[in-house]
Amino acid sequence: MNCHVSHISGRLATLVTGASVSSRYIVRPVISRGQLSRHLSTDAMPLDDQRRPAIEPMYEGPSHSAISVLKRTCLGFGILGLYLSEMVYSSPMLSTELSYVMAGASVIPLPVVHHFTQDYVSRIFRLHDDTKVQDIDSLTNDETLLVEKISFTGRKYYNTKVKVSELRTVNERAGFVNWRASDTALYVKDDIGGIKMDRIWGIAEHNSGIDNGRYFGK
């Protein structure tokens, strides 16, 4: 009977939180998701030894590949534009003003695209505390997520930790930011991730004084 109850509890924890209660199913993903990378920085801070990400993301942004390609394209376009503008500047047959226009037109797209997409969340992983038993109480107490974003150039991903209890829903930067936790701005697409993400959305809405029927406690 106790084994049956334990099995049901484990299945419930997996369904609601997106995590397995058995630590043998929780392994550290590739190193890029096992570190906390600071934005616009070349170094990375490893995660606490007591913490490890879940094996699979509980959320994956549908457009993260397209945004990554767009940023890389803008970067390549900017480099090519600067090279061509230098050639125009060096040519005695063409005006200097034209080279300035070419340089500006080729460089501007990347920061503009980054401004609106810098907080787009590509993936969300649950962080597990290895010092605690992996049951519903420990999974939902001081619940922390590992949020992955796309770098400025679109060639790398960087991570940051977010506490679920601090999440709020917002409408900022023309709708390109819809979550905020302390000083961290995020854009997460709704209706993706099933009941696991609905639960997180419910907490964020509850913290913002919104009731859409998705909040059922922590």
Image (cartoon, rainbow, N blue to C red):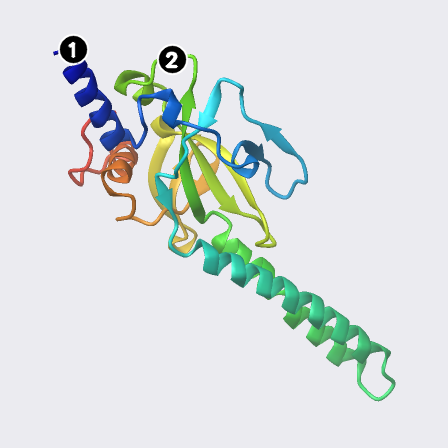
Judged left or right of residue 174, residue 93 is right
The residue that disc 2 covers is 132
> Quadrant location of residue 47?
top right
The residue that disc 1 covers is 2
Disc 1 and disc 2 in contact, CB within 8 angstroms: no
Residue at image point 61% right, 54% down? 153
Q: Is residue 86 above or below residue 25?
A: below
Observer-nearest of 29 and 178: 29
Q: Residues within 10 Å of mark 2 (few under 14, many from 20)?
A: few
Q: Is residue 13 above or below residue 188?
A: above
Q: Is residue 107 visible?
A: no
How many numbered discs? 2
Q: Is residue 121 visible?
A: yes
Q: Quadrant of the C terminus?
A: top left
What's the residue type where badge 1 is placed? Answer: Asn
User: Disc 1 versus disc 2: distance between alpha carbons?
Assistant: 20 Å
Element under disc 2: loop
Mark in front: 1 vs 2: 1
Q: Residues within 10 Å of mark 1 (few under 14, many from 20)?
A: few
What's the residue type where badge 2 is placed? Answer: Lys
Residue at image point 56% right, 35% down? 31
> Quadrant location of residue 98?
bottom right
Element under disc 1: helix
